[in-house]
Image: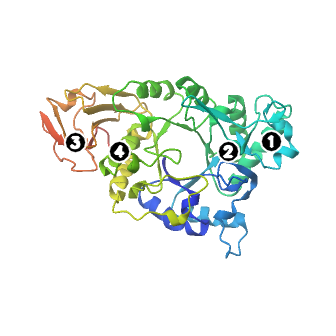
């Protein structure tokens, strides 16, 4: 899965999405993920849904004669014409505190001190409470069946609008048996439905347990890897045989990498290259290709905040997406191993296919600010495949890989070598 996150509040009304969809297709993405499109509550947050069966007025074209659902379907049809699949956020762990559901079905919610509870979390030693949200009680509700049927109806409503993928927000907050039953129920009518679990903030074991509920894929934490520590590969090994994972260089929940990297474009290229090739799936938010600095905000972002920059990574991203689409080794969570390297500032990562004979070698400059030298007496000692290795790097690919091999890696540069026939 090569996923482009089209952020609704930045894209504006559905009628204005076609240029963004076309750009995503040209970049080589095959899925479009959009954050919640249903009507929000008083806070205005996309993730504070008041009415699950109505469309956010901010995303509608007031001049259109089409009904809200028809405007959504027209957008989905435009995506399908570009051979793009549509994925939407599924937020069923909580709803808006001003949703009518609190009055109609008060027993669907967690209670604290006699009141319907707000969800919360621990952040840097402090308890953070989302007062605009009410937490569903999927575990202990006396009307657990009614709550479950509501969730099924929500998914079916979105399926009828044309969505076939669901990013399951805070998936770990729902019991696994609820997810298994929900996924099985939906797939009786929509067998091609895709469910992806968001597990940000989970422990590795919690992530594995969530993955076992029948999800198509999970999101991993590779964005925060330092290219050296063991934790990412440990987590990867824990989940990869359960379900594939999806990497991302930034998301709507994180600061923009261009801002974090102080305007260093090489850091953006480095992180997208790694995200695209490390795991079976990759996701990138809109604006990353242009080095946007302003973070996406679930309440305040507006189309007028579209940035004009001098950055354009379209060709770089398109090349990597093409490589991912052509070589099956990059489409799965196969065995991955860090190999030794004399230069500690260079990552040498071997990835193998668990489904075929494919194998790849990633040589990455960990340093996005400085050049680093890489030398190998024999590149083939890093791989188990017989020659030849083919250089499919996005920058300065080599027609011939000599033995011994030396290369001066520019800041953040990655060399991508594969020993696998390309798909047609």
Q: Name the residue under label 3.
A: 370
Q: Marks 3 and 2, Cα distance to the nearest angstrom?
A: 42 Å
Left/right placement of residue 59 relative to residue 249 reads right
Disc 3, SS: loop
Identify the residue position indicated by label 2 in the image: 91
Mark 1–mark 4 CB contact (< 8 Å): no
Picture disc at residue 273: 4
- In primary-sequence order, the first of circles 2 and 4 is 2
In contact (CB < 8 Å): disc 3 and disc 1: no
- Cα gap from disc 3 to disc 1, whole angstroms: 56 Å
Q: Count the labels in the image.
A: 4
Q: What element carries label 1?
A: helix
Question: Which comes before the other along the chain, label 3 or label 4?
Answer: 4
Single out the residue that lies furthest toward the front.
126
Residue 424 in view in this figure: no
Question: Residue 149, which numbered label?
Answer: 1
Q: Residues within 10 Å of mark 1 (few under 14, many from 20)?
A: few
């Amino acid at each position: 899965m090569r996923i482009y996150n089209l952020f609704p509040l930045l894209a504006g009304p559905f009628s204005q999405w076609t240029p963004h969809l076309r750009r995503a297709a040209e970049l080589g993405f095959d899925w479009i993920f959009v954050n919640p499109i249903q009507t929000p509550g008083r806070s205005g947050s996309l993730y504070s849904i008041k009415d699950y069966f109505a469309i956010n007025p901010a995303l509608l074209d007031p001049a259109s004669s089409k009904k809200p659902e028809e405007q959504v379907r027209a957008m989905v049809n435009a995506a399908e014409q570009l051979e793009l699949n549509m994925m939407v956020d599924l937020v069923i762990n909580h709803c808006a505190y001003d949703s009518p559901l609190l009055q109609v079905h008060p027993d669907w919610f967690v209670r604290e001190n006699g009141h319907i509870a707000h969800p919360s979390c621990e952040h840097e030693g402090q308890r953070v409470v989302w007062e605009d949200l009410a937490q569903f009680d999927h575990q202990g509700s006396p009307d657990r069946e009614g709550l479950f049927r509501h969730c099924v109806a929500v998914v079916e409503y979105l399926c009828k609008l044309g969505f076939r993928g669901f990013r399951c927000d805070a998936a770990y907050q729902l019991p696994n048996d609820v997810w298994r039953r929900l996924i099985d129920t939906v797939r009786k009518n929509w067998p091609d439905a895709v469910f992806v679990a968001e597990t940000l903030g989970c422990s590795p074991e919690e992530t594995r347990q969530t993955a076992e509920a029948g999800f198509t894929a999970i999101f991993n934490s590779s964005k925060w890897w330092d290219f050296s520590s063991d934790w990412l590969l440990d987590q990867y090994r824990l989940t990869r045989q359960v379900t594939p994972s999806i990497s991302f260089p930034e998301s709507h929940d994180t600061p923009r990498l261009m801002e974090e990297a102080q305007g260093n474009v090489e850091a953006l290229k480095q992180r997208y290259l790694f995200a695209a090739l490390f795991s079976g799936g990759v996701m990138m938010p809109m604006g990353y290709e242009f080095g946007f600095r302003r973070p996406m905000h679930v309440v305040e972002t507006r189309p007028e905040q579209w940035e004009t920059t001098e950055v354009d990574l379209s060709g770089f991203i398109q090349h990597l997406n093409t490589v991912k689409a052509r070589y099956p080794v990059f489409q799965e969570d196969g065995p991955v191993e860090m190999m030794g390297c004399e230069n500690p500032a260079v990552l040498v990562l071997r990835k193998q296919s668990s489904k075929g004979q494919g194998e790849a070698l990633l040589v990455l400059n960990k340093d996005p600010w400085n050049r680093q030298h890489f030398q190998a007496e024999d590149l083939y000692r890093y791989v188990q495949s017989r020659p030849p290795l083919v250089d499919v790097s996005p920058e300065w690919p080599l027609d011939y890989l000599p033995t011994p091999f030396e290369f001066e890696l520019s800041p953040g540069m990655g060399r991508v070598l594969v020993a696998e026939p390309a798909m047609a």
